[in-house]
């Protein structure tokens, strides 16, 4: 069934496509997140208005606050074709965005302040007193369409030197080629003091997801999370977890934690019972939110251990403070145990018994040593 938004897009599409389109803008972009509220993007765009007009590179850093607010700083380096050939230009911009859900789609409202000749490059304002700064306000709506397609409508007003300069109205159609690549086809109508400007936009964006090159390099040198038997020997557990029960609250405890140890901080969970079990649904964190690590198919052998490293494959994300802190271990039922880590050194770890009593000892990940040994 075609819904109201889809009907609107279908009605407007022939009008936009039948309009004269003398300008064509093409773009290619990359974006990625840091695994938290921060993200970055890079985009290359070329514009043809008859002959080639402009080419530029945009670099941007963004930060989200919850689901509804985002701040974005953008730096643009461009080559603009003029009467005597190409000349370099620069632009800095700060964009503040509010967004939310509306019906089947989402809305956004954006305020943008830009400086076309940033002070860092052209400190003498007298060199370009006009057209240097601009304010822009934009509202838009995006909605699913058919299959992997979605459509969006937006309108943007631009003021330069406190004077209305132009209004840009856009219709975009996005196609998700796969989980990471998106193709955008759009039409833009710009209204200003001069004749209306019609532009066809063609863009491609690739999403790198969570990309942290320095952290990924370090992660490669950190051991993966592993299971160990009662002798301290590594155990291959792939494919075994489906037939095992979930570890009970009285079956697992934190037996060792290493802070500022080599090659990385680590935790060791010990199973003192005669039954193998899996850690599905167990959680670990150095914060009460318990979002750092969530168990899936990890196995703790009878009288054995399971060891995970900070930033290692299958391990946990945040490090442990050598200055002392509290760490939290919760079973799938939500029962939480709190372990207090004392201020330690780079050569020592902290071992615990089932009741939480601890002492400092040389690190021994994978080989459980009861207190006193």
Image (tube, helix red, strand yellow):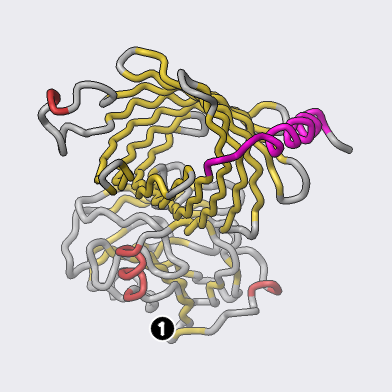
Whether the magenta-drawn stretch holds residue 207 is answered as: no
Q: Give the magenta range.
A: 3-23
Is residue 256 something one can see in this rendering?
no
Which quarter of the figure has residue 5?
top right
Residue visible at 38% across and 63% down in the picture: 353
User: Looking at the image, which is closer to me, 360 or 64?
Assistant: 64
Report x, y in % for residue 61. Answer: 35, 43
Q: Main secondary structure of the magenta part?
A: helix
Residue visible at 47% across and 33% down in the picture: 66
Which quarter of the figure has residue 243?
bottom right
Give the vertical position of 68 relative to 87 (above or below): above
Where does label 1 land, which residue? 232
Report x, y in % for residue 216. Answer: 36, 67
Give the vertical position of 300 relative to 284 (above or below): below
Report x, y in % for residue 166. Answer: 46, 21
Give the vertical position of 144 relative to 262 (above or below): above
User: Dividing the image into 4 quarters, which one contains the N terminus?
Assistant: top right
User: Looking at the image, which is closer to me, 156 or 352?
Assistant: 156
User: Dividing the image into 4 quarters, which one contains the C terminus?
Assistant: bottom left
| Horizontal relation, residue 306 to residue 5: left or right | left
Residue visible at 24% across and 68% down in the picture: 261
Graded by Cα atoms within 10 Å as few (under 14), some (14 to 19) or many (20 or more), the crowding at tag 1 reads some
Looking at the rendered structure, the number of numbered marks drawn on it comes to 1
User: Looking at the image, which is closer to me, 354 or 74?
Assistant: 74
Give the vertical position of 155 relative to 349 (above or below): above
């Amino acid at each position: 069934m075609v819904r109201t938004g889809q009907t609107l897009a279908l009605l407007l599409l022939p009008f936009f496509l039948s309009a004269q389109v003398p300008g064509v803008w093409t773009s290619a972009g990359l974006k990625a997140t840091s695994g938290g509220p921060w993200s970055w993007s890079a985009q290359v765009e070329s514009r043809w208005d008859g002959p080639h007009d402009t080419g530029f590179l945009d670099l941007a850093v963004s930060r989200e606050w919850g689901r509804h607010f985002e701040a974005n700083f953008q730096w643009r380096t461009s080559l603009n074709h003029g009467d005597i050939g190409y000349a370099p230009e620069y632009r800095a911009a700060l964009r503040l965005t509010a967004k939310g859900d509306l019906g089947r789609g989402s809305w956004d409202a954006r305020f943008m302040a830009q400086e076309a000749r940033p002070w860092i490059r052209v400190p003498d304002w007298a060199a370009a007193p006009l057209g240097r700064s601009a304010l822009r306000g934009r509202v838009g709506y995006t909605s699913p369409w058919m299959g992997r397609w979605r459509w969006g409508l937006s309108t943007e007003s631009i003021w330069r030197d406190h004077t209305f300069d132009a209004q840009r109205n856009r219709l975009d159609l996005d196609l998700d080629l796969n989980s990471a690549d998106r193709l955008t086809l759009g039409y833009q109508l710009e209204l200003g003091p001069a004749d209306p400007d019609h532009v066809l936009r063609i863009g491609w964006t690739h999403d790198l997801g969570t990309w942290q090159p320095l952290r990924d390099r370090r992660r490669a040198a950190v051991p993966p999370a592993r299971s160990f038997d009662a002798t301290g020997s590594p155990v291959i557990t792939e494919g075994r977890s489906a037939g095992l029960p979930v570890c009970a609250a009285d079956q697992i405890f934190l037996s060792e934690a290493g802070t500022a140890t080599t090659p990385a901080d680590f935790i060791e969970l010990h199973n003192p019972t005669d039954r193998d079990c899996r850690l599905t649904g167990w959680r670990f964190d150095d914060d009460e939110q318990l979002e750092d690590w969530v168990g899936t198919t990890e196995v703790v052998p009878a009288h054995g251990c399971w060891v995970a490293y900070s930033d290692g494959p299958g391990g946990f994300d945040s490090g442990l403070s050598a200055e002392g802190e509290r760490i939290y271990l919760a079973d799938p039922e939500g029962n939480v145990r709190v372990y207090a880590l004392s201020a330690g050194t780079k050569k020592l770890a902290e071992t615990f018994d089932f009741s939480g009593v601890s002492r400092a000892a040389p690190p021994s990940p994978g080989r459980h040593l009861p207190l006193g040994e």
